[in-house]
Image (cartoon, grey):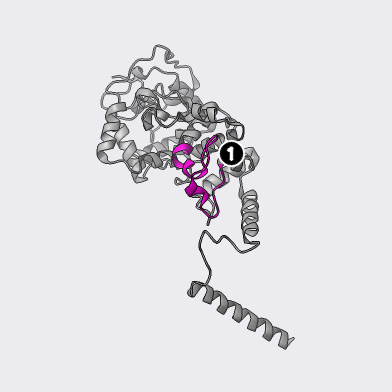
Amino acid sequence: MKRVFQTLAALAVCGVIAAAAVVGFGLYNVSARQGHLPGVEWVLHTTFKQSVRLRAPDASEVPDDLNHADRVQLGALHFQGACAFCHSVPGQPRSATAQAMNPPPPHISEAAAKWEPQHMFWIVEQGVKMSGMPHWPADGRGDEIWSVVAYLNAVPDMTAQDQTALTGDGSGAARCSACHGEGGKSTNSYVPRLDILTADQITQALIQYRDGTRPSGIMQEAAARLTNGQIDRIAGRYGAAQPVSDPAAATPQTDHAGAQLAMRGTDAVPACTQCHGPGRAADAPIAPVLAGQSRAYLESQLKLWRDGHRGGGVRANLMTKAAQDLSDAEITALAEWFAGLDPAADTQ
């Protein structure tokens, strides 16, 4: 037995020396042209697949609105700008550069067909080592990741015409308008309206996204390369000097569950309406108008505040404190009530 252990120890030492030589003298050829040694690609890909399946969230965590058309479109628009240069889109081939990568990123129509939504969520959120696949750039933004997954889940049945209907052909409207709508009046329930925000509020939000103080994988991608001058021009284009009345908006209902919550303050936290309206005091902080903003967007933001994933302005701590005890049902009620109000109801 002593001889056996000595032999094993000698082999281990030789192995370490050989590995050090391969690393230290550059003996291993890292050229993407050469590919992997026989069997290595199978080992790596199998490890990847099994790792995803082990760590992905449970299927019960897939949101009920995964197939919502607005969610699919938001995911498609982000994918077009942030991911398509590697994975392409339905009806279009991958670029020659993408195909020359090792490993080559799969065409999205091929990749999306192999995974369940919860698996795709984990891949988008975590990324994949040694493949060029990045992790989601903002922590705690599962709401955004599910929108990308909603698009990926729809891809296997998508035609080139379907893709164009979602994102356009790349030669149309300005980048901001693609998501936020013409004039900032978004019709996508997962994207905020800009036409009811002031230019200063839009400016501050874009600066926070650009600097990473307000986490968002979608908006950090959009704002990362904006200069201060460009931010000012965007804010001036979309920001409203005065909210415009919406004839379709409902009359405020004081007996609505959301109204009761919005008008109820505590010793530590003022009522929502005190800062956000409607009917806020003339000396109230200039907080964003919530009346007329979409329900889905308001719900997602309140949950981010509650769960500690929403950063940003100077009153961020106040909003975190205001939302920390809200239940999902209370958040839904608040979002529903504010979404149904006339934006102009906030005027002094």
Of the pair 323 and 16, the residue shown nearer to us: 16
Residue 72 in the image, given as x and y percentages of width and height = 53, 31
Residue shown at the point (42%, 35%) measured from the top left: 322
Of the pair 157 and 62, the residue shown nearer to us: 157
Residue shown at the point (57%, 60%) measured from the top left: 35
Crowding near pointer 1: few (<14 within 10 Å), some, many (20+)? Answer: many
Q: Quadrant of the N terminus?
A: bottom right
| Magenta span contains residue 33 | no
Image: magenta residue range: 79-107
Does residue 198 appear left or right of residue 192 in this picture? left
Residue 314 in the image, given as x and y percentages of width and height = 31, 40
Residue shown at the point (36%, 44%) measured from the top left: 213
Judged from this view, the residue extending furthest toward the top is 247
Does residue 344 appear left or right of residue 155 in this picture? left
16 versus 85 height, above or below:
below
Judged from this view, the residue extending furthest toward the bottom is 3
